Image: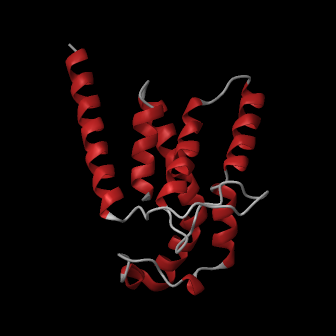
């Protein structure tokens, strides 16, 4: 799934209690992709400028993606790593940080919306490289319902909130 959708799903599902909660969940929803692809994306823009955006509508040649991106992707897209970090934060805070669940939601969505052809989600890494050959998120069968459902949920949320505010 695209990074913005992950943030929006995180915000609407786990961040409705306050603005701070929304933005925390929004950022946790985007974090796995931001931390795995962000440096690569930023360096591409710095080195190539606007030329870097040419061909963004389809996956780049896997041979052009540096090895560190794959390592960071494995780390940030593992349910085991997520569970360990969530547990550590819970232990250190003395209570869970519910908005962190947006990271777990990101992973749950990616497991089924990434195919073997491009960055399948290694949800049991480092124990196993097991992954599911899902339907890519850019496929209209995934993308269109995703956008429509997000639009409906946010419209419902804001309309309900507006009615509740005198």
Residue situated furthest top in the rendering: 166
Residue situated furthest front in the rendering: 133
Residue 118 in the image, given as x and y percentages of width and height: 53, 73
Image quadrant of residue 126? bottom right
Image quadrant of residue 88? top right
Q: Between 19 and 85, which is closer to the camera in this rendering?
A: 85
Residue located at (22% from left, 23% from top): 162
**Number of marks drawn:** 0
Quadrant location of the N terminus? bottom left
Residue 2 in the image, given as x and y percentages of width and height: 42, 59
Residue located at (67% from left, 53% from top): 78
Residue located at (55% from left, 67% from top): 37
Quadrant location of the C terminus? top left
Say if 79 sits above or below 130 in the image: above
Residue located at (51% from left, 38% from top): 24
Left or right: 5 in relation to 152 = right
Say if 113 sits above or below 61 in the image: above
Residue 155 in the image, given as x and y percentages of width and height: 23, 35
What is the basis of the colouring in this image?
Answer: secondary structure
């Amino acid at each position: 799934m695209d990074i913005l959708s992950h943030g929006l799903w995180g915000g609407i599902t786990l961040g409705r209690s306050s603005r701070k909660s929304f933005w925390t969940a929004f950022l946790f929803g985007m974090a796995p992709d931001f931390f795995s692809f962000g440096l690569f994306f930023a360096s591409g823009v710095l080195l190539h400028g606007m030329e870097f955006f040419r061909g963004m509508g389809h996956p780049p040649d896997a041979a052009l993606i540096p090895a560190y991106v794959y390592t960071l992707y494995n780390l940030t897209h593992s349910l085991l790593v997520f569970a360990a970090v969530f547990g550590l934060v819970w232990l250190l805070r003395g209570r869970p940080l519910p908005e962190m669940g947006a990271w777990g939601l990101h992973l749950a969505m990616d497991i089924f919306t990434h195919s073997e052809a491009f960055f399948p989600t290694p949800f049991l890494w480092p124990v196993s490289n097991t992954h599911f050959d899902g339907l890519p998120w850019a496929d209209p069968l995934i993308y269109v319902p995703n956008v429509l459902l997000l639009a409906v949920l946010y419209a419902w949320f804001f309309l309900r909130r507006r009615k509740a505010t005198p």
